[in-house]
Image: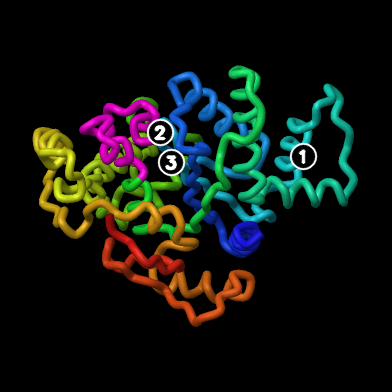
């Protein structure tokens, strides 16, 4: 019940801010490695399909063998026109001749498709139904998902870099460009993640030190520059050898060598941006500047029902990036 109340509070916050971004994390029950290539493709298909029927956009993702991360953007309810909501109503009706909704049904449906709990629960449930039929099993497959609200700009850039480097930290690849099941590789192959992907240029251009004139360029050139500069920042989330006792070398080395061969600078203080604790990225409730986190606390503090006084916490993992939830242990 507590987690449900937290999600409701954050979802209510999204109704008063344009384009709220959530970092969603979930793991298979028991940590079972059930995600093969077929399962990953099916899961991804369902997430993309859900964007046609609900009110969200997939900004980034990575699918691992026993868990996933994704960043989902949800606009305020009033952002979508009546016509667009009606289209989504028609798509969700099982009848070939969908009926007209009553005003009450229409408003309830509009609320639902803008609710992060419903959005994530829907594509997870549809995947579980498909997987259970395929494997001849019954019951749940996922734990209860974690959602963290992310501030636009630097916090969003860091979270995208963090999830992109997941397969590198897991030792699956030495460069995320070689891992098929992540938004970063998909973008390099297709040029964009969805028709609204160019909005990321506006969100990230300052955080990635993109040229000021980028917003005046054609969309394709904007995206090409965006992913080029994003790649140079990936080393900020690279793990160091000291945090992986079984590794004999810094597994970010190959990434560094490739970037240098591509003519890019790798003069980044990597020691200050080493592997972060998963709890910081996936269980922080809110991540961003101190002001952003304090505003979330002010808006949702009563629902969060903290018994003690809370403030934005800075663990110095990333410069001036704060989290709402205080963790006893942050580093591995």
Q: Which residue is mark 3?
A: 60
**Where does residue 164 sit, x and y in percent of width and height?**
33, 40
Q: Which residue is mark 2?
A: 64
Number of residue marks:
3
Classify mark 3: helix, strand or loop.
strand
Judge whether 198 appears above or below 150 on screen: above
Judge left or right: residue 267 versus residue 16.
Answer: left
Q: Which residues are magenta?
A: 163-187
Measuring 37% from the left and 38% from the top, which residue is drawn there? 218
Judge whether 269 appears above or below 98 on screen: below
Q: Earlier in the sequence, mark 2 or mark 1?
A: 2
Measuring 44% from the left and 29% from the top, which residue is drawn there? 33
Give the alpha-carbon distance from disc 3 to disc 2, as whole Å.
14 Å
Q: Which residue is mark 1?
A: 86
Judged from this view, the residue extending furthest toward the bottom is 309
Nearest to the observer: residue 115 or residue 222: 115
**Where does residue 158 sit, x and y in percent of width and height?**
33, 53
Which-is-in-front pick, marks 3 and 1? 3
Nearest to the observer: residue 305 or residue 138: 138
Judge left or right: residue 70 versus residue 142.
Answer: left
Classify mark 2: helix, strand or loop.
loop
The C terminus: image quadrant: bottom left
Rate crowding at label 1 as few (under 14), some (14 to 19) or many (20 or more) other CA atoms within 10 Å.
Answer: some
Can you see residue 32? yes
Would you say residue 184 sits in the magenta stretch? yes
Rate crowding at label 3 as few (under 14), some (14 to 19) or many (20 or more) other CA atoms within 10 Å.
Answer: many
Would you say residue 5 sits in the magenta stretch? no
Q: Earlier in the sequence, mark 3 or mark 1?
A: 3
The N terminus: image quadrant: bottom right
Rate crowding at label 2 as few (under 14), some (14 to 19) or many (20 or more) other CA atoms within 10 Å.
Answer: many
Measuring 25% from the left and 40% from the top, which residue is drawn there? 228
């Amino acid at each position: 019940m507590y987690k449900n109340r937290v999600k409701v509070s954050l979802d209510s916050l999204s109704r008063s801010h344009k384009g709220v971004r959530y970092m969603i994390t979930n793991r298979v029950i028991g940590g079972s490695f059930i995600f093969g290539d077929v399962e990953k493709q099916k899961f991804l298909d369902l997430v993309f399909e859900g964007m046609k029927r609900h009110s969200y956009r997939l900004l980034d993702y990575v699918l691992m063998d026993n868990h996933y991360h994704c960043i989902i953007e949800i606009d305020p309810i009033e952002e979508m026109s009546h016509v667009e909501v009606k289209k989504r109503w028609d798509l969700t009706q099982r009848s070939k001749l969908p009926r007209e909704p009553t005003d009450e049904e229409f408003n309830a449906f509009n609320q639902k498709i803008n609710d992060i709990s419903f959005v994530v629960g829907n594509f997870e449930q549809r995947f579980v139904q498909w997987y259970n039929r395929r494997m001849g099993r019954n019951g749940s497959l996922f734990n209860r998902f974690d959602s963290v609200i992310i501030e636009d700009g630097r916090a969003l850039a860091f979270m995208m870099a963090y999830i992109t480097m997941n397969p590198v930290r897991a030792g699956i690849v030495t460069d995320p460009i070689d891992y098929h099941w992540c938004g970063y590789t998909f973008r390099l192959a297709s040029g964009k993640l969805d028709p609204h992907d160019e909005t990321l240029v506006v969100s990230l251009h300052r955080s990635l030190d993109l040229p000021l004139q980028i917003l005046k360029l054609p969309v394709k050139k904007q995206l090409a520059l965006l992913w080029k500069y994003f790649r140079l920042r990936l080393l900020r989330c690279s793990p160091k050898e000291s945090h992986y006792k079984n590794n004999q070398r810094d597994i970010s080395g190959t990434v560094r060598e490739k970037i240098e061969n591509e003519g890019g600078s790798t003069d980044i203080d990597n020691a200050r941006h080493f592997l972060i604790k998963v709890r910081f990225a996936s269980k922080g409730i809110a991540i961003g500047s101190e002001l952003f986190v304090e505003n979330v606390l002010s808006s949702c503090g009563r629902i969060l029902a903290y018994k003690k006084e809370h403030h934005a916490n800075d663990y110095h993992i990333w410069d001036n990036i704060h989290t709402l939830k205080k963790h006893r242990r942050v580093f591995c």
